[in-house]
Structure formats: structure tokens, C-alpha cells
Amino acid sequence: MELDQLEQDLTEKISSAGAESALEEIRVAALGKKGVISEKMKVLGKVTPEERKTLGPALNGLKTRIADAISARKAILEEAALDARLATEKVDVTLPVRPEPKGKIHPVTQVFEEVAAIFADMGFEIREGPDIEDDFHNFTALNFPPDHPAREMHDTFFMNEKGNGERMVLRTHTSPVQIRTMMNEQPPLRVIIPGRTFRCDSDQTHTPMFHQVEGLVIDKETHMGHLKGTLTEFVKAFFEVDSVKTRFRPHFFPFTEPSAEMDVGYERVGGELRIGQGDDWMEILGSGMVHPNVLRNVGLDPDEYQGFAFGMGVDRLAMLKYGIPDLRDFFAADARWLEHYGFDPLDQPSTATGLSR
Ligand code: PHE
């Protein structure tokens, strides 16, 4: 009777213990060296063998049940403590790691990447050259006659004369890199050349610094049909619309023969520029078959080698494709303009997944 009462008391205490420390106190008080149950065990030695037969198992059973109850309660308290800790240390994984990235890709950069993606698919590689050029690469090797007014037609920015009387120029086009490429490498060549170019000019569609992508193909059989096909395919891919109005117009460049300019149809609606419709034409590129004199100037035999070249205005392409009305805004460094016309830095243009979004 006495043991039953003791077991009931202890069990109640155990199940209402609210902390591990309280539980430990109960354990010491019951099963510790001087605990109630331990004290009772000591009495076993003094009772009669007859009494011991029933008291022994009763005490042992009690001891085991209490010990089990304590460890069961302990497990519950430990789990509750862990839950409480986890609740305070909770991380909201749906929160952004850091503020949304600020900053946009400039339309000129975007268009460079788009043009590169399209020509890469057609097997073109990229070459580059310096912004500051000498007269030879920018003019002479490209078949501009010496002191010919054609040099003026580019509104060239000249640097101050050097000691030897030579004047470097800010390259007026990316064509000098045609020369550099043909002098350094052997045909077959199929390259595009992106870069900055400079002419003293400024209005809605001209800025003193602008951007071009040059193209050059040299081998033994490429002809004007390939030129037209390549550029027509390019325009279709670039503008990402079903039909684009284009036209080839005969033109003159000293370094190509025959030569043609390509125009794209557009119209202005309100403050916006719309591509592919309307009666206005914007010139987007110059092109032609590489002039035999140019081939000779770089040491190639024009009876053996031939090919085409083109140079396109990247800024103009951006204006047309993205409806940007004024070229001068491109370089005004206005963050609001960039926020509006810029592109997501994480969207890489690709002909497979889409050039632009
Ligand atoms: N370099 C010419 C320009 O800037 C464009 C061009 C390049 C024309 C290659 C023909 C061939 O106007």
C-alpha cells in the first residue's frame, strides 16, 4: 500500500515536471544514493527472507518503472526544448537573400551581344582593334587615295602631330581591323569586329562617338549573293519580327567594289520609333565586295582570294529595335533612361532561348 502511494506520487511529479532541471531533482530524490527508493532498498537486508520474497521484486519493479518514466519524460522535455530553440532560430527561406540587384545592361551592350550571338551561329569569330589608329590602317590600306577628300567625308578627329609629323586618328570606322586581321591571319576568314568609332557629328541619329560591328569574309568563292543572303538573314534574326522592310542601295566606299548600303523601313509614331512599317528609311549598314586593291595592300592575291565586308551601326540598330527616338540620350548617362531602356544583367542573349525579352 505504502509503495503504491509512493509510485503514484512520483509518477505525478514526473509527468508534471516542466524542465529538465526539475526532473533531475526528482530523480535524485527518488533514485539517488539517499533517495526514497534507494533507502527502501537498504531495508531489504534487514527483513525476513519471507518478506524479502515479495518486497524485493516490488521494490525492483518500482525502481525500474520510475527510471523509465523519468527517461520518457526527459525525452519529451528535450524535444520541446529543441522545438523552442528552432522556433527562435527560424530562417524565412522565402525572403530575398539581398535586395533586388540594381543596374541594367545598356542597349548598346545588349545589341553587341545579340549581333555576336547571331553571327556566332553562322560561324563568325570575334576580332578587335585599337580605338586610336594610324592613317595607314584607317585610310591608306583601305584604298583611300592620299589627300583625297574621302578622308574628309568621315569628319575625322585628328590627334596632335607626333615628332615625325604623323597624326593618329580616332578611328572613324571599324574597317581598319579588317586590315589588321588580314595582315595577321590567313584565309579563310569569317570574323566580326565590334567596337567604338568616332566622327565629328551630332544630331538625332548621329553622335561623335558611336559603335559599329564590322564583318569580314575572305575565301576563294564568296560572292555578292552570299553578302546579301547573310545580311538579310541577320536582319530577320535580329529584329525578331516576321517581316522587316529592307532595301539595298548602290553606294561608294573606297574599300569595296561593288558597294551597297542597307536601309530598314521605319516610322515615327508620337515619340516612338517603329520598325518594319512606314515610309522612312534608316541606313543601318554599309557593305560590299572587298576591293582588289585592299587585298593587294594586305598581301593577298585578288585573282585567288575574294570576299565581302560590312559595317553596321550598332546604336542605330538599338534605336530601331527598341524604339528609342534620340541617339544622343544613349550617352547622356541618365539613370532613369537606363532604367527604362536597359536590360536584365542575368538574361544573356542567345538565338536558342531568345535574343531579348
Ligand atoms: N566602314 C564603312 C562606314 O563606316 C562601312 C563599311 C564597312 C562599308 C565594310 C563597306 C564594307 O561607313
Image (cartoon, rainbow, N blue to C red):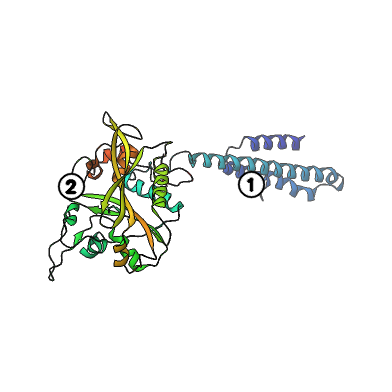
**Foreground mark, 2 or 1?**
2
Earlier along the polypeptide chain: callout 2 or callout 1? 1
Q: Categorize mark 2 by other alpha carbons within 10 Å: few (<14), some (14-19), many (20+).
A: few
Judge by depth and name the residue closer to the eye, 79 or 190: 190
Identify the residue under disc 1: 28
Q: Categorize mark 1 by other alpha carbons within 10 Å: few (<14), some (14-19), many (20+).
A: some
Judge by depth and name the residue closer to the eye, 189 or 92: 189
Three-letter code, disc 2: Asp
Three-letter code, disc 1: Val
Question: Horizontal placement of 224 versus 54: left or right?
Answer: left
Question: Horizontal placement of 85 versus 69: left or right?
Answer: left
Label 2 element class: loop
Residue 177 sits in which quadrant?
bottom left
The residue lying furthest to the front in this view is 303
The residue lying furthest to the bottom in this view is 164
Q: Position of residue 91 (x, y in %)?
A: 48, 41
Question: Horizontal placement of 1 versus 331: left or right?
Answer: right
Identify the residue under disc 2: 201
